[in-house]
Image (cartoon, rainbow, N blue to C red):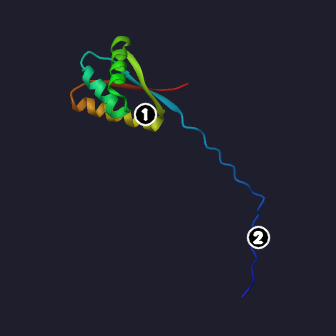
Amino acid sequence: MTDTTITANPSVKQSVQIAEPSMYKVIYINDNQTSMEFVTGSLVDYFGYAEIQAEKITEDIHQQGSAIVAVLPYEIAEQKGIEVTVDARSNGYPLQIKLEEDE
């Protein structure tokens, strides 16, 4: 058998930079068919708002035409948007949710 020596180069350093995930605004768009009760309930159920705070945001959506309901990392914002949209459709509501990158 032959003796083999393997030498590692300890001077090699790996540099890994982890960037913060991009944040996205979850925006509810007002319509004339989705009930305010559904919107308020979705804010409580999916975003963890207290009932009073959810009612205030629902009023803002109704009066202003839209409102930012959360700012989250993209994957979470997308998942919440999908969950609320599926819930809205299963209840017969056309609620629209839009995601926009937060600057």
Q: Earlier in the sequence, mark 2 or mark 1?
A: 2
Residue 62 disc label:
none
Between circles 2 and 1, the one closer to the viewer is 1
* Crowding near the residue tagged with mark 1, few <14, some 14–19, many ≥20 C-alpha atoms within 10 Å: many
Q: Which residue is mark 1?
A: 77
* Quadrant of the drawing holding the C terminus: top right
SS assignment at label 2: loop
In depth, the one of 59 and 103 nearer the eye is 59
Q: Is residue 76 above or below residue 96?
A: below
* Residue at 40 percent of width and 19 percent of height: 67
Q: Which residue is mark 2?
A: 7
How far apart are the alpha carbons under marks 2 and 1?
49 Å
Discs 2, 1 touching: Cβ within 8 Å = no
In depth, the one of 17 and 54 nearer the eye is 54
**Residue 83 spot, x, y in % from top left:** 33, 35
Horizontally, residue 29 falls left or right of residue 74, namely left
* Crowding near the residue tagged with mark 2, few <14, some 14–19, many ≥20 C-alpha atoms within 10 Å: few
Horizontally, residue 58 falls left or right of residue 37, namely right
